[in-house]
Image (cartoon, rainbow, N blue to C red):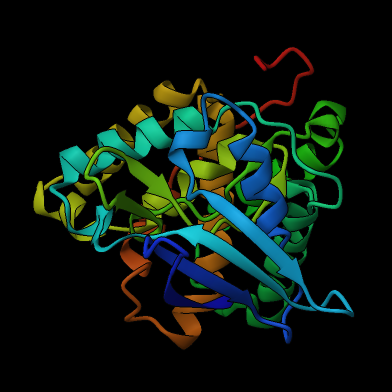
């Protein structure tokens, strides 16, 4: 959460100032950007952090950032080009260790499991998602919660890497990720934001499930992600979102895509400490 304003540097160079929202939990965005900027592979693929300052009580932070082309997010690029660029960015973020204090993905997965159980208890027989999909999602989340390799994983994740959060730089030379919600561990979560966006492009092919699987495969292959794990995570997150959206916002643009993902129930994820790192 934050507000962004265009500014000029001492030489007139175009920059941006982002002020974090003091009324929301701090995400440690500045720490994450600094960590990526310190890595040769990833520094060109995240918005450059030029300076930062924190107020006296630490509740608000100002980030001085490079300015990007706000009119050229991947959202407006042809889908094939956008998918290729997103895959390149995801691959470049790589194995950067997360800074201390960054929330672990396991905490978010625990929250999702609790939310699914609460939704199911509230809705009862009126639960709008098939029981198999709900059971599969909970089995995935419960298995991950006891996987020591998952809990020990401290790789830095963007956690909101979708088409509006990747912009072209002003020199028209590279695609750059912005607005991370930093988490540690399980980079397989990174495919979910992309899969829930631009569903219209998938639907336009006449076979949206095949199109989403193609997008999924491209992202997983580019970043060397564990496909069964990424698929299981996408399915679980989709179930959680459908259980909230269908009773409240059934016409949400995200419902059709989540409905496809919720059906990805086989094969299930089996935790193992020998997953590729």
Q: How many marks?
A: 0
Quadrant in the picture for the C terminus:
top right
Q: Position of residue 136 (x, y in %)?
A: 62, 46
- The residue sitting at 73% across, 67% down in the picture is 53
Res 145 visible:
yes
Left-right relation of 161 to 55: left
Residue 200, quarter of the rendered image: bottom left
Residue 247 in percent (x, y) is at 49, 84
Observer-nearest residue: 174 or 88? 174
Q: Quadrant of residue 20?
A: bottom right
Residue at the image position 82 percent from the left and 43 percent from the top = 145
Q: Measuring 48% from the left and 29% from the top, which residue is drawn there?
A: 92
For the residue pair 92 and 82, the one nearer the viewer reads as 92
Q: Nearer the viewer, residue 85 or 170?
A: 170
User: From what the image shows, is residue 264 above or below residue 119?
Assistant: above
Look at 33% across and 28% down and name the residue there: 218
């Amino acid at each position: 959460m934050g507000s962004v304003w265009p500014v000029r540097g001492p030489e007139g160079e175009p920059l941006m100032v982002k002020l974090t929202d003091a009324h929301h939990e701090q995400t440690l965005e500045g720490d994450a950007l600094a960590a990526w900027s310190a890595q040769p592979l990833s520094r060109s693929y995240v918005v450059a952090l030029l300076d930062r300052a924190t107020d006296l009580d630490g509740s608000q932070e100002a980030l001085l950032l490079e300015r990007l082309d706000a009119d050229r997010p991947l959202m407006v690029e042809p889908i094939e080009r956008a998918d290729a660029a997103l895959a390149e960015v995801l691959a470049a973020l790589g194995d950067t260790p997360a800074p201390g204090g960054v929330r672990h993905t396991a905490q978010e997965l625990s929250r999702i499991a609790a939310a699914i159980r609460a939704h199911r208890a509230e809705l009862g027989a009126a639960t709008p998602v098939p029981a198999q999909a709900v059971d599969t999602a909970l089995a995935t989340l419960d298995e991950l919660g006891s996987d020591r390799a998952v809990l020990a994983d401290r790789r830095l994740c963007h956690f909101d890497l979708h088409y509006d959060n990747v912009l072209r730089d002003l020199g028209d030379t590279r695609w750059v990720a912005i607005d991370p919600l930093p988490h540690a561990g399980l980079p397989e979560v990174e495919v979910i934001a992309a899969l829930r966006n631009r569903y219209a492009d998938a639907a336009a092919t006449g076979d949206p499930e095949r199109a989403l699987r193609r997008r999924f495969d491209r992202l997983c292959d580019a970043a060397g992600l564990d496909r069964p794990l990424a698929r299981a995570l996408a399915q679980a997150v989709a179930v959680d979102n459908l259980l909230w959206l269908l009773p409240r916002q059934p016409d949400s643009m995200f419902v059709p895509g989540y409905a496809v993902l919720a059906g990805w129930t086989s094969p299930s994820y089996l935790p193992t400490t020998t997953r590729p790192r």
